[in-house]
Image (tube, helix red, strand yellow):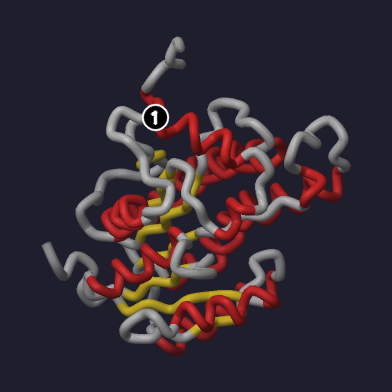
């Protein structure tokens, strides 16, 4: 199948390097006919610029710190002038300070927790609402998640932030449904991204996945997740919103294996 996103204009956040799920989504979206714009900011921008050169055509990069309302306003103004409307947004943004991860759940202070929740969950609302005037019926917002139904080793306040992200997506789906805007999340299995390298205990989660996922799971291959993102950006899910789609080899559906 080709041309799934023909003629669509899509903003993709969170592209750092070619291991990024967001990179896979951006590459596949372009292959399926979408015109893509990336966003980045600060020290990460040089990584995004280097990675953008691997995409064909090479997309422009807009400055966007989702915790700065003025950046969201500037991106909205740019996209209005550039495209006139936005058909899709990929929210691939998450961050927690080091002292809110790695076994520090009981000791993390509110400023660090607030940063994790604002950046990883509230930002979905801030960005979606900031661009909503550019989105017509049929537009799709897709966020990246890591299943927050259980407590994961070392994930700590990022896990709480992901739970908030899941709830935020449902409320956005409720309030934007009357405009015909869909909001869904893709819950990915563990992928060896640059961000994952900074999480102490990631290897423990990764090893368990390989043993329990009935379809198996390749932690070095983000493409299955990217394909799901592109599918949700397309017109093939016209009546689906507020949903959490698992792309994890089936791990989420299994009970704990007895060894």
Q: Is residue 154 above or below residue 237?
A: above
Q: Residue furthest left?
A: 1
Image quarter hosting the C terminus: top left
Residue at 32 percent across and 79 percent down: it is 35
Q: Quadrant of residue 55?
A: bottom left
Residue lying at the far bottom of the rendered structure: 81
| Spot occupied by residue 58 in the image (x, y as percentages of width and height) | 38, 86
Query: If the image is split into quadrants, where does the N terminus sit?
Result: bottom left
How many discs mark residues in the rendered view?
1
Q: Mark 1 points at which residue?
A: 251
Q: Is residue 106 above or below residue 243?
A: above
On the image, the x and y values in percent for residue 229 come to 35, 55
The residue drawn where x is 32% and y is 83% is 56
Specify whether residue 246 is in view: no
* Drawn side of residue 101 relative to residue 15, left or right: right
Which is nearer the eye, 21 or 218? 218
Residue at figure coordinates x 20%, y 73% from the top left:
6
- Residue 217 position within the rendered picture, expressed as x and y whole percent measured from the top left: 36, 40
127 or 254: nearer the viewer: 254
Q: In this view, does 146 lie above or below 198?
A: above
- Camera sees residue 254: yes
Residue at position x 37%, y 63% in the image: 25
Determine the residue located farthest toward the front in the rendered image: 259
Foreground residue, 23 or 202? Answer: 202
The picture places residue 19, in percent across and down from the top left corner, at 46, 62
Mark 1 lies on a secondary structure that is helix
Q: What is the quadrant of residue 258 in the picture?
A: top left
Question: Callout 1: 10 Å neighbours few (<14), some, many (20+)?
Answer: many
């Amino acid at each position: 199948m080709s041309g799934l996103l023909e003629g669509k204009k899509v903003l993709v956040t969170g592209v750092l390097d070619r291991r990024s799920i967001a990179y896979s989504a951006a590459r596949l979206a372009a292959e399926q006919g979408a015109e893509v714009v990336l966003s980045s900011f600060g020290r990460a921008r040089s990584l995004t610029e280097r990675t953008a050169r691997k995409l064909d055509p090479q997309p422009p990069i807009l400055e966007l710190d989702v915790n700065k309302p003025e950046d969201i306003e500037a991106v909205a103004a740019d996209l209005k002038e550039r495209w006139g409307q936005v058909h899709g947004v990929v929210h691939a943004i998450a961050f927690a300070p080091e002292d809110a991860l790695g076994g520090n759940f009981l000791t993390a202070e509110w400023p660090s927790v607030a940063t994790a929740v604002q950046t990883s969950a509230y930002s979905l609302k801030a960005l979606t609402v900031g661009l909503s005037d550019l989105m017509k019926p049929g537009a799709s917002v897709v966020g990246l998640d890591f299943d927050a139904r259980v407590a994961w080793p070392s994930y700590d306040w990022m896990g709480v932030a992901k739970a908030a992200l899941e709830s935020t997506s449902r409320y956005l789906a409720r309030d934007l449904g009357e405009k015909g805007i869909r909001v869904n999340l893709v819950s990915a299995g563990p992928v060896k991204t640059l961000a994952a390298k900074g999480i102490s205990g990631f290897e423990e989660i990764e090893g368990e996945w390989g043993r329990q996922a009935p379809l198996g799971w390749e932690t070095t291959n983000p493409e299955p997740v990217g394909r799901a993102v592109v599918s949700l950006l397309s017109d093939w899910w016209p009546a689906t919103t507020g949903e959490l789609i698992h792309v994890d080899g089936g791990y989420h559906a299994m009970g704990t294996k007895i060894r």
